[in-house]
């Protein structure tokens, strides 16, 4: 109990700071007005939106929204049975797929429309979880999202666990004006939102000031709401300025870590609200192709289309979400003999023709997306396409085992066959030269053997920023003061993800040398970079810093603290808190944080190990033994824990 109180006290301070920041922020933006207020003037856009997946991202349960069979149907998986039924107009799930005895939950929300529909239940007041038995819209059947990989009820990845919590992991991108409002002291949620579903204001921002402008533009123009554009809206999506639009979409369509407690105010630059995931193993293949569900942005940043100024709405109608044209026509808007005057660097050429794709017209092989946007299936049945728009590289598949579009279709042929076909048909192609994939693939096996090559990738300005930042990320396990010195020039790189990556590599540098390198980053215009710098302030000699530097350090550290407080319900955050407390030599707080990790996720082995090791180090052998026993109950066959059992038995 003492450790829990220490942890709660620590987070209470952070929570107070975060709540104050949120309160100040809410006072600085207009009020939300609701999608219904927009339809009177914007009926065409509203009509398109009503048919979109955005409008159905989160719905109240009812006969018009629930598509699944709730007529007392049953589904059994791994010996656990769920029954779906209605009572007095409400929808319920009775299931044995829970810790302990069978429970019945009322359906509180409906998530999505196609190709599957998922249902939300409240497992305790305020805590909403997404149920993992979902409805296949095409085949009209129940199925389990994770099939044979479905975890047992005691696992942190089970649908009742922290990683399937709707408040923390999902709602932000399925609602408008969402606030999570987690209380770490009592581990409860009091979440709220302006509107469920992705409404007009989710992208265009709170609309009250815009309504004031619409009613009386002249009066509003004399006293506009601070920070809004000329029509009272926060984001300004202007022709010829694609980045604002792309970053607004990327807030949800990306694999990232959030800094805030819910939706950032629309118009907030992406890197002020999130830390973008690099091209890490398990998320992306070594060549940057999608592997896990990474939600588009990290792929798109790798593309030449992004580099040339193409935006989401060049291909997708923004209100309906539908493609601008049918089939290959969406691509031939630009990739044709006529080209597109908006993108003058394009080569005018006939692409939608067998001379280019060498497949029969009107067949799957003749579709641009088949070759340049490989599809991967997530959530069992949901196909998502890679948005890096890459040229197939079966030659890399032959060397590295990465996938390629040719063998996606021609699965009966080898990568060598596909590479030979491309060489024969495109003998002068420039797409068979060296690729960063070869360096990344080797580094994933042993980053120390090619640190020089990774440094070269990081410094290659022609590579996309996410690729260069990923090279820096691969250096983290083997970073030395010499490597840190070699990337100091990148601390001023134009790309914020590169600057943040170079900062992370400064950790092994002695504090007296590290401080001059990170001080400028404490005032960086981008929050993700400032937070990266703040993490490095621990242990730095800051007692005699000039006032201006001390203030910058304090502001950046507060931003980092607030971002941690906003994710106090994440096991990952508690790991960071535990590690930070260790650096500060606050042993009770470190133990409390690591205990909180394993309370949230009992399968987090490294947090159990830290509890045991710390208690052994301070001579608390009984406490170490108790932690180990708890760890083994949750993970009885883990070899690391078994080795500690042997160590403790010899004490």
Image: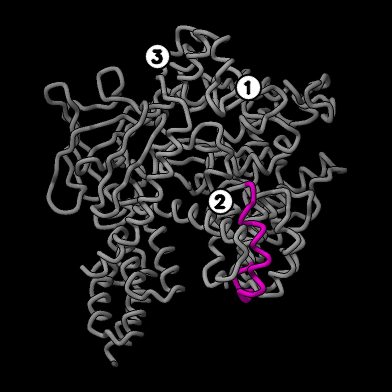
Q: Secondary structure at mark 1?
A: loop
- Point out the frontmost of discs 2 and 1: 2
Identify the secondary structure beneath mark 3. helix
Left or right for 498, reference 143 = right
Q: Is residue 515 magenta?
A: yes
Badge count: 3
Residue under the image location 73 percent in, 53 percent down: 493
Describe residue 270's horizontal placement relative to residue 137 as left or right. Answer: right
Mark linked to residue 327 = 1
Horizontal and vertical percent position of residue 143? 32, 38
Residue 150 sits above or below residue 39 on the image: below
Query: Does label 3 or label 2 sit earlier along the sequence?
Result: 3
Q: Do the CB atoms of the residues marked 2 and 1 lie less than 8 Å apart?
A: no
Residues packed near mark 2 inside 10 Å, few (<14), some (14 to 19) or many (20 plus): some
Residue assigned mark 2: 277
Q: How is the image coloured?
A: one colour
Q: How far is mark 3 from mark 2, CA to CA?
A: 36 Å
Relative height, residue 154 to residue 51 (above, below): below
Position of residue 503 in the picture relative to residue 26 (left or right): right
**Residue 85 drawn at (x, y percent):** 16, 29
Residue 306 at what x, y percent from top left?
A: 70, 36
* Quadrant housing the N terminus: bottom left
Whether residue 432 is in magenta: the answer is: no
Q: Residue 450 has which mark? A: none
């Amino acid at each position: 109990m003492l450790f829990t109180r220490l942890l709660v006290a620590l987070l209470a301070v952070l929570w107070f700071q975060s709540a104050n920041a949120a309160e100040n922020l809410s006072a600085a933006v207009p009020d939300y007005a609701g999608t219904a207020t927009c339809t009177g003037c914007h009926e065409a856009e509203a009509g398109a939106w009503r048919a979109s997946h955005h409008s159905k991202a989160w719905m109240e349960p009812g006969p018009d929204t629930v598509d699944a069979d709730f007529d007392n149907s049953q589904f059994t998986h791994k010996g656990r049975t769920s029954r779906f039924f209605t009572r007095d107009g409400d929808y319920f799930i009775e299931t044995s797929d829970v810790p302990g005895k069978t429970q019945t939950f009322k359906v509180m929300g409906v998530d999505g429309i196609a190709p599957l529909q998922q249902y939300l239940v409240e497992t305790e007041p305020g805590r909403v979880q997404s149920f993992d038995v979902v409805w296949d819209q095409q085949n009209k059947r129940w199925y389990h999202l994770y099939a044979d990989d479905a975890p047992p009820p005691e696992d942190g990845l089970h649908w009742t666990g922290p990683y399937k919590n709707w408040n923390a992991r999902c709602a932000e991108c399925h609602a408008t004006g969402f606030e999570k409002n987690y209380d770490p002291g009592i581990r409860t949620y009091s979440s709220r939102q302006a509107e469920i579903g992705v409404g007009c204001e989710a992208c265009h921002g709170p609309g009250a000031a815009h309504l004031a402008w619409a009613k009386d533009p002249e009066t509003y123009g004399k006293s506009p709401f601070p920070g809004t554009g000329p029509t009272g809206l926060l984001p300004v999506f202007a022709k010829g300025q694609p980045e604002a639009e792309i970053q607004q979409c990327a807030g949800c369509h990306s694999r990232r870590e959030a800094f805030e407690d819910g939706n950032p105010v629309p118009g907030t630059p992406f890197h002020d609200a999130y830390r973008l995931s690099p091209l890490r193993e398990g998320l992306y293949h070594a060549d940057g192709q999608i592997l896990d569900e990474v939600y588009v942005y990290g792929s798109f940043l790798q593309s030449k289309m992004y580099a040339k100024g193409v935006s989401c709405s060049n291909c997708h109608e923004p209100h309906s979400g539908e493609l601008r044209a049918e089939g290959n026509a969406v691509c031939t808007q630009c990739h044709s003999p006529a080209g597109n005057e908006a993108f003058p660097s394009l080569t005018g050429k006939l692409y939608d023709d067998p001379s280019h794709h060498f497949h029969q017209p009107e067949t799957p092989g003749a579709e641009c997306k088949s070759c340049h946007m490989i599809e991967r299936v997530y959530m069992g049945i949901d196909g998502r396409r890679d948005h890096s728009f890459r040229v197939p590289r079966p030659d890399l598949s032959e060397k590295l085992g990465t996938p390629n579009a040719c063998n996606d279709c021609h699965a009966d042929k080898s990568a060598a066959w596909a590479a030979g076909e491309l060489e024969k048909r495109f003998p002068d192609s420039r797409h068979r030269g060296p690729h960063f994939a070869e360096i990344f693939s080797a580094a994933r096996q042993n980053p120390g053997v090619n640190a020089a090559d990774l440094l070269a990738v990081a410094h290659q300005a022609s590579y996309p920023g996410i690729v260069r930042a990923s090279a820096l990320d691969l250096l983290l396990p083997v970073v030395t003061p010499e490597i840190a010195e070699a990337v100091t020039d990148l601390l001023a790189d134009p790309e914020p993800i590169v600057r943040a990556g170079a900062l992370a590599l400064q950790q092994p540098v002695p504090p007296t040398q590290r401080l001059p390198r990170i001080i400028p980053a404490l005032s960086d215009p981008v929050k993700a970079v400032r937070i990266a710098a703040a993490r490095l302030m621990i242990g730095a000699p800051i007692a005699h810093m000039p006032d201006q530097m001390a203030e910058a350090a304090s502001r950046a550290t507060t931003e980092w603290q607030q971002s941690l407080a906003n994710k106090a319900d994440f096991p990952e955050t508690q790991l960071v808190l535990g590690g930070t407390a260790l650096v500060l030599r606050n042993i009770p707080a470190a133990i409390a944080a690591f205990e909180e990790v394993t309370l949230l996720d009992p399968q987090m082995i490294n947090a159990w190990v830290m509890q045991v090791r710390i208690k052994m180090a301070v001579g608390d052998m009984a406490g170490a033994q108790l932690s180990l026993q708890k760890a083994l109950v949750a993970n009885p066959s883990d070899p690391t824990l078994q080795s500690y059992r042997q160590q403790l038995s010899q004490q």
